[in-house]
Structures are given as C-alpha cells and as structure tokens.
Image (spheres, rainbow, N blue to C red):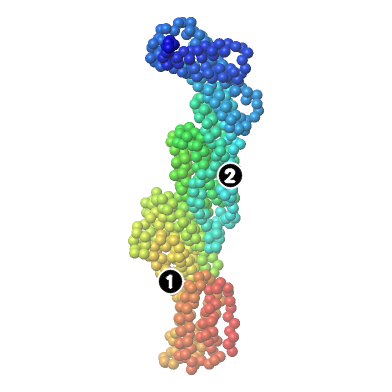
Amino acid sequence: MAVEESEPVIPELEREENLIAAAKHIVKALGSNKNLTNDAKKVLADLGTKLSSMSIPSEMEEGKEGEEDEEEEEEEEEGAMNATEDRINVIQEKIMRWEEDQSMIWDLGPEEASEYLNAANEARRLIEKLESFNLSKDDQEYKLLQRAYSVLQTAMARLEEEFRNLLIQNRQPFEPEYVSFRSSEEDPVDENSIVSLGDESVDESLQRDSVSRAAEEHIIDLVHPGVIPDLRCIANLLFASNYVQECSHAYTIVRRDALDECLFILEMERLSIEDVLKMEWGTLNSKIKRWIWALKIFVRVYLASERWLSDQIFGEGEPVSIACFVDASKASILQLLNFGEAMSIGPHKPEKLFRILDMYEVLADLMPDLDFLYLDDVGSSVRIECHEVLKRLGDCVRVTFIEFENAIAANASSTPFIGGGIHPLTRYVMNYLRTLTDYSESLNLLLKDREEEDAISLSPDMSPGTEEDSKSPGSPSGVSSMTLHFRSVASVLERNLEENSLLYKEVPLQHLFLMNNLHYMAEKVKGSELRLIYGDEWIRKRNWKFQQHAMKYERASWSSILNLLKDEGIHVPGTTSISKTLLRERLRSFYLGFEDVYRIQTAWLIPDVQLREDLRISISLKVIQAYRTFVGRHNSHLSDKHIKYTADDLENYLLHFFEGSQKYLQNPHRR
C-alpha cells in the first residue's frame, strides 16, 4: 500500500502568529462597514483591543524582524486607530446615555452602576494609553485623546453627583439614646450676692454635674453600611482620574451639613461671644450643662464615627481621609469651642466657678480624643484651638477662685445678723469649699502657678502654726496649692466673722456668734472631704477657738449674776451675821438678772442641737448649782415668799435658751 504524502507541519508559534494576523485583517475589513449596529461595533472594538494587546513571542518577533513590509504596518496602525475610535464611540455612548436620563444610576441597581463604572474606568485607561504615546497636536490620535478627555470629564461629573447623592440619601438618623437630655431646673443663684444661699440651696444649686465617661467612644453608622463599598469604588475611580479635589469637596459639603444637623438636634445653637456675655445666669447655667453633655456625645460618638466613615471610604489613616474629616468637622467643633471661649471671657463671678470647672474638666477629659482625631498637620489648627480654649478655661478658674476669696473679704455687713446664729456667708463659703473638693485634682493643677505668691500672703493664719498643721500626723504630708488657698479662704472668712461680731452691742452675743460660726466651720471640715485638705490639727484649733468663745460667753453673761449668789457683801458690818435685808435684796437682784438674761437670750440662736445642749448643761451646772447652794445655806433666813423660783424652775427655763424665739418669764410660784 502506497504511503500518502503528508502536508508539511507548521510550527505552533508560526500558526499562532498567522491566526492573530488573520483576525486583525478581519477586524479591519469589518470595521470599515458603515452599516454595522452599535452592538457589533462594540464587539469589534473589544476584539480589536484584545488582539492589540496580544504579544508574539520574542523568538518569533526576532525571526520576523524586518520581514513586515511598510504597507502592512500602515494597515495595522490604521486598524488600531479605528479600533480605538470604535472603543471611544462605545464608551461615549454608554456615558452620554445617562446625561439625558434624570434618574440616579445607583438607584437602578448594581448592574447599571457596575456598567457605568467600567465604562468610566475604560475611558481613563484609554487616556493613559494614548498619553503614553506623547502625541502632538498634528497626530490623528490626538483628536481621539481630546474626545476621551471630554468623555471622562462628563463621567467624573456624573460620578461626583452620584457620590454626593449616595451620601445624602443613605444618611442614618441620629440614634435617640444619644440625643436625649433632660435639662435640670435653673440654679436659684443670685449672681449679685455671695451670701444668698443656705445649706440646702447650696447643696442643690452648687451640686456638681458628674463629668462621667458615660459617653465612651461608640462608633455608629452615619451612612448606611450597604453603600460604603459603592462610595469607596466611586472615590477610588475619581482619585485615579485625578479628581481628588472634586470628590473631597463633595464629601466635605455633605458631611459638614450632617454635623451641623447633629448640633441642631443636640440643641447647640450658634451663639456669638456677645450673645453669651449678655445672657442671664439662669439661662446661661442651663446652656453650660447642655454644652457639657453635648460635647461628650459629639466628640466620643459623632466625631469618632465621622472619622471612621472617612477612613472606610478613603482608606484608614490616608492623608485624604484625615483632610476630609477635618474639613467636614472643623466648623462644628469650633462652634462648640467658641462657647467655651466666651465663658472664659465673661465676668469672673464666684457662682460660675463650678460650671467653668465642669467645662474645663470635660474638655480636659476629651483632649486625648481630640488630639487623636485631629492629628498631623492638617488637623493642627483645630488641635491648637482645643488646647487654647482649655488653657483659657483654666485661667478663668484661677481668676474666679481669687475673686471668690476677694468677695469674702469685701462682704462687709452694716447690721448684725439677728440672733447670733450661723451667718449666711459662713454657710455659703463652707459649702462652696466642700463642693470644690470634687475638683481637687484640677484645682491643685490650676492653682499651682500661684502657690509661692499666695504662700507669702496667707498671714495671719498661714503662720508657722499653720505650717505645722500640714506636717502633723493627722494632716496631709506637705501643703498642696489647693490646701494653701483653702486655708487662706478660711482665714479671710474668720476675719470677716470677727468684724461682723463687733456689730453686736452685747459682748456675750459677740462670743456666741463666733462660737456658732467657728463650730460650724469645724464640723463642715470634719464631716467632709475638706478634712483631707485642712487636716485634723486645723480642726482641733477651731474646736479650741469655739470653746474659748463659749467660755467667754458664759463669763460675760453670767459672772455678774453668779456674783450675787456669793456671801461677800451680805454680812452686817463688824459682825459675822448675815443681813437679812441684804440677803433678800441680793436674791431679788439675782431673779431680775436671770429674767433679763432669759428675755434676751431666748431670742438668741444656737442652730446645732448638740452644741446648744452642751452649752445649756454647762450653764446649768454653774447657775443651778450656785443657786441651790445659796438658797440652802441661807434657808433659815428666807421664807417661801422670798423664793420666787425653785432650782427646778430655773433648770426648766434654761431649756428655753438659744431657740431663736424671745420669751418672758411669768413665775407660776410667785406669792
């Protein structure tokens, strides 16, 4: 059987080259047909793009180098340009179709959105390819490049609009648990007087608002999480196409408006410094409380979430992400800081110190959060302003505290306080200081700058004896700046009380007044955190002082009366016999003296129950015992008609003393 002659075997690489060349000729021939449909043109454009990207192995290229004639090169160039033009036509048709449609692409579903993104990205890649040829204006491809630019510009404008619409339409409502605030009643503080408050009103009105970390950082979805990938894709394409500024601007505008709305919901109205300075204290006090609450929520929830959102869209920690966050949030945070600055400028009245301290502490507490949010150079202006406002608030605290001390010294009364009880100034100051102990850490820091200056001027109470107080076993080791200032305030108060005591005409009432007020000061310190500041030695000294005034009161009130119950002066001259007449006159004078003291001192007041009881017992031990002894010793010279009051009567009458309600004796045993 004859063997048939076989066809020559074509090498695999040569066959592949021939196939690619044949396909290119087919594409070129079909591309010249003007009657092709758009779909057919798209297919040919895609095929042409793929064929142009195919490379022939270097061995084949080297083997064929110099073999292609000039006519074939020209045909291929012409075919490539036709394919590029067809490609631009298809892209342009996809892009321009949406310019006539009022619908938003992303509202129609993921397929439409994906097709548009791919078309825009293809235009970008085509531009990159054409730009790589370094075309001149005379080149035919240059016109194609200009068309591609125009198509891309149209696509970018549309994507910017879609990006903005996605941000707006998918904005999440602010969560209710973060926007509920029950404003407490306005403080009943009379800002024109430092002595308008008693214990109960001080406790209520100066009660510190807790600067708690209840609003720990909590990330919430400010934009529906389902659209984050779409926003990221659009942003990436805009950035890749050199439309960074346009994308950033669109994002910034939308998110700035959203944060403005957040402040509106938090009821943080835009107030100028002038508005704040003109505001009455009651209204301003409520706004400060709201500011403290809103600042915590705004920084730890909304700004933290805003930063997270920009990181999700633009890339975590990327410069453009930080810049967008800063630009979007800057106006809002500066609006809040503006209120803090206004408060630091306003009149430094003592009633405002607690609220200023609250503002200082919440801002100091949030400073690490703010430093992190506004890091790098792009956020430096906001970061610096935060620290500046914190410093101004701290300065305001220092000045206001000094004004508080000066106000005590300047609070001179022209009339004595009725009854000799606890002066309103004493109540106010001690409760004021007690409330300030909640701010010990901040005050120690803020008052430290004036420590040396104040230590020199704290006489007389900051004498060596006071310095010893601070080193005694029952006192804190060393004297803190806050301790120095608090002791200075107590000294100023004591001097003021001494001056007020001189307004009383009755010497016993002067001592009773000082006894009451010094006892109150000591008890306030002993029963509160003030004990850690003043120390046990300070308390012991005040206890000793008020006891000295109690003794001086007794001496001034009762010495002359008790002298009537002594035997001196009632003897018959030249004998040891008692003069009945002098005895009875002495007893009658005693009764008149007791009645007079009773009438006067039942109107006097010792508010502290235990102190009142202790003083009554002390008086009773002296007066009743002396009366019993006197009457018993001279019983033989006295008849019942001379005994106006029994010892039990007098003892019962002493129970009416210091109740603040004047009484008169009507003797039931008078005969």
Of residues 235 and 554, the one nearer the viewer is 235
* Circle 1 Cα neighbour tier, 10 Å, few/some/many (<14 / 14–19 / ≥20): some
Q: Position of residue 638 (x, y in %)?
A: 51, 91
Q: Which mark is residue 547?
A: 1
Q: Position of residue 541 (x, y in %)?
A: 39, 66
Q: Amino acid at mark 2?
A: Phe
CB under 8 Å between callouts 1 and 2? no
Mark 1 vs 2, N-terminal side: 2
Of residues 390 and 294, the one nearer the viewer is 294
Residue 519's place in the image compared with 307, above or below, is below
Of residues 240 and 502, the one nearer the viewer is 240
Q: Position of residue 664 (x, y in %)?
A: 58, 78
Q: Is residue 422 visible?
A: yes
Residue 402's place in the image compared with 70, above or below, is below
Mark 2, secondary structure of its residue: loop
Of residues 96 and 4, the one nearer the viewer is 4
- Which circle, 1 or 2, is nearer the viewer? 2
Q: Amino acid at mark 1?
A: Gln
Quadrant position of residue 205: bottom right
The alpha-carbon separation of the residues under discs 1 and 2 comes to 62 Å
Residue 591's place in the image compared with 516, above or below, is below
Query: Label 2 belongs to which residue?
Result: 174
Q: Residue at x 45, y 14 (%)?
A: 15
| Image-based side of 457 in relation to 268, left or right | left
Residue sticking out furthest to the front: 1
Q: Residue at x 53, y 63 (%)?
A: 199
Quadrant of the rendering where the C terminus is positioned: bottom right
Residue 65's place in the image compared with 309, above or below, is above
Mark 1, secondary structure of its residue: helix
